[in-house]
Image (spheres, helix red, strand yellow):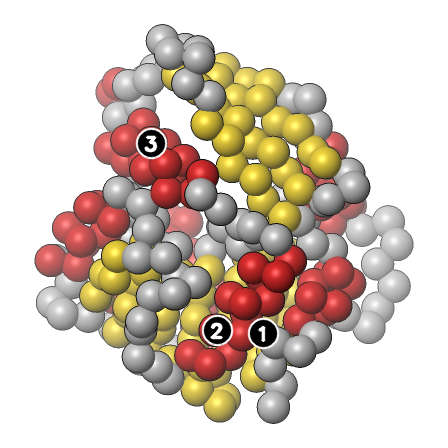
């Protein structure tokens, strides 16, 4: 997991100007959260908050948020916190060992679960269980292996758009390890092709996620894909969204003790 701080700090320098403001995706996350957890206000712990824009949207909606971030993207999050009227606190550190006092009504982890090994995920899930209030929920975005596998071998060129805050010409190369079920996502600046950085994300089918949860103190309560809840007991053969359309799904977890 040593790559994570450098990867997210460097890509944050590429994209922060363009992507750090609160936007529609952030407000949609708040709306989805409130549909699941109720309007609150709630005490929320966000793991891997990045630029802090989603955490800021939660604070705007009246929730109190503790947001943890390891990378230099936390600079943007702290700027959001300064404007939050005290409803947003940013904690710099690794959420595998950072000290944050619970309990929380909810723990969220948007777009990032899967860093490290299965043992690492279980260690984090046990921490989440310990942070949650007895009736609390954890909302975790999980990488869908079927879609990431379909992207194996894809490449993309991203051209500068300085009027929108994108100032670098970038390249991306995707690969997928079908044995380890790991997405390998590599990026470099076209001006520095020798400086390739890569993120590796473990992908889990819903069935694999339920196995992963065993012994962590958490159980799978619901899955939301493309904004719609899936019936976990139904037959999903041929589900186009999960097979081809959604590169991640939202897992709603609850304490199982």
Quarter placement of the C terminus:
bottom right
x%, y% of residue 116? 56, 50
Q: Residue at 36% across / 36% down in the picture?
A: 6
State the SS at label 3: helix
Q: Quadrant of residue 201?
A: top right
Label 1 vs label 3: CA separation?
A: 31 Å
Q: Which residue lies furthest to the top in this view?
A: 191
According to the image, label 1 marks what residue? 253
Q: Earlier in the sequence, mark 2 or mark 3?
A: 3
CA gap, disc 2 and disc 3: 27 Å
Label 1: few (<14), some or many (≥20) within 10 Å? many
Residue hosting label 3: 10
Camera-side mark, 2 or 1:
2
> What residue do we see at 25% from left, 49% from top?
74
Determine contact: label 2, label 1, CB under 8 Å: yes
Q: Quadrant of residue 67?
A: bottom left
Q: Distance between the residues labelled 2 and 1?
A: 10 Å
């Amino acid at each position: 997991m040593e790559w994570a701080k450098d990867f997210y700090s460097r890509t944050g320098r590429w994209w922060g100007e363009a992507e750090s403001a609160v936007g529609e995706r952030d407000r949609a996350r708040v709306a989805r959260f409130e549909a699941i957890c109720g309007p609150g206000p709630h005490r929320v712990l966000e793991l891997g908050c990045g630029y802090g824009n989603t955490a800021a949207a939660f604070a705007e909606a009246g929730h109190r948020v503790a947001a943890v971030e390891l990378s230099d993207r936390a600079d943007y999050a702290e700027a959001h916190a300064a404007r939050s009227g005290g409803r947003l606190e940013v904690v710099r550190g690794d959420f595998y060992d950072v000290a944050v006092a619970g309990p929380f009504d909810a723990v969220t982890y948007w777009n990032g679960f899967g860093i490290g090994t299965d043992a690492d995920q279980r260690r984090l899930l046990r921490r989440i269980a310990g942070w949650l209030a007895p009736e609390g929920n954890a909302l975790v975005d999980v990488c869908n292996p079927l879609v990431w596998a379909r992207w194996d071998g894809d490449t993309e060129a991203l051209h500068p758009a300085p009027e929108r805050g994108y100032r670098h010409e970038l390249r991306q190369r995707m690969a997928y390890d079908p044995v380890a079920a790991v997405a390998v996502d590599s990026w470099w600046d076209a001006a520095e092709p020798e400086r390739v950085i890569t993120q590796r994300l473990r992908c889990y089918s819903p069935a694999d996620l339920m196995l992963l949860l065993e012994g962590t103190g958490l159980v799978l309560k619901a899955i939301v894909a493309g904004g719609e809840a899936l019936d976990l007991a139904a037959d999903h053969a041929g589900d186009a969204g999960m097979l081809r359309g959604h590169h991640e799904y939202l897992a709603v977890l609850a304490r199982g003790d």
